[in-house]
Image (spheres, helix red, strand yellow):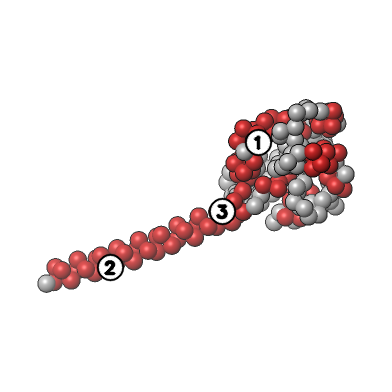
Amino acid sequence: MTSFKQESMTRREFCKDVTCTAFCCGSLVSAVRTGSGSAADGKEHLAAACGTWCGACPAYLAKHGQTAPEKRASVTAKAQKGVPDPKWMDGLLCDGCLSGGQLAPHCEHCQIRLCSKRTQKDARCTECPELPCHRITGLIRMGEYLHRGEYLPNLKEMREMGVKDWATMEEQRWRCPRCGGPTSWYDVKCAGCGEPRSRAVFPLLS
């Protein structure tokens, strides 16, 4: 009898521990998903018409990021070959190329965005028979900025993977490997925890 009682208590304790563990794990997964902003949360609109990932754009992070602009500016690379002036997007706010919301002026008037919106089913260049056209190659050459060198490879990946899966991949790729915070195209380190730039994104030229 005593043995049965002890066993029953052990089982109750075990079930309690399992329940608590499951709850904690579930909460952690939920927190990670909320923090990472997966494509399931509606981030496909950050897969831009040209192929860039708007989630790493300074204008998007200025509006949607959790880091103060002055702190983010402190981790931005200095102007060099392939890297624009750190202040090139100061004061600009954007919801993302295909968000239907607020756009930075250069996105609002972007000929690539306007053309793909007019001619392509998903408003992206992925299936355009003219790709690469003079509009996108011209922008890639303008300043020869490193993030623009990813336009065409990204469009190819979108076409092969599908926009949703590609957006999920990019959302993770542009997050700090240590704290999970969002990083911008030209951050040398995480503005949140100071972790060096992820090796998963393009390297900055020294």
Q: Label 1: which residue?
A: 158
Which of the two discs, 1 and 3, labels the residue nearer the N terminus? 3
Crowdedness near tag 2: few (<14), some (14–19) or many (≥20) residues, C-alpha within 10 Å: few
Which of the two discs, 3 and 2, labels the residue nearer the N terminus? 2
Q: CA distance from mark 3 to mark 2?
A: 31 Å
Q: Label 3: which residue?
A: 33
Amino acid beneath label 2: Arg
Q: Residue at x 66, y 49 (%)?
A: 43
- Which quarter of the picture shows residue 165? top right
| The C terminus: image quadrant | top right
Q: Label 2: which residue?
A: 12
| Vertical order, 192 against 144 (above or below) | below
Nearest to viewer (mark 1 / mark 3):
1
Amino acid beneath label 3: Arg
Crowdedness near tag 1: few (<14), some (14–19) or many (≥20) residues, C-alpha within 10 Å: many
Of helix, strand and loop, which one carries label 3?
helix
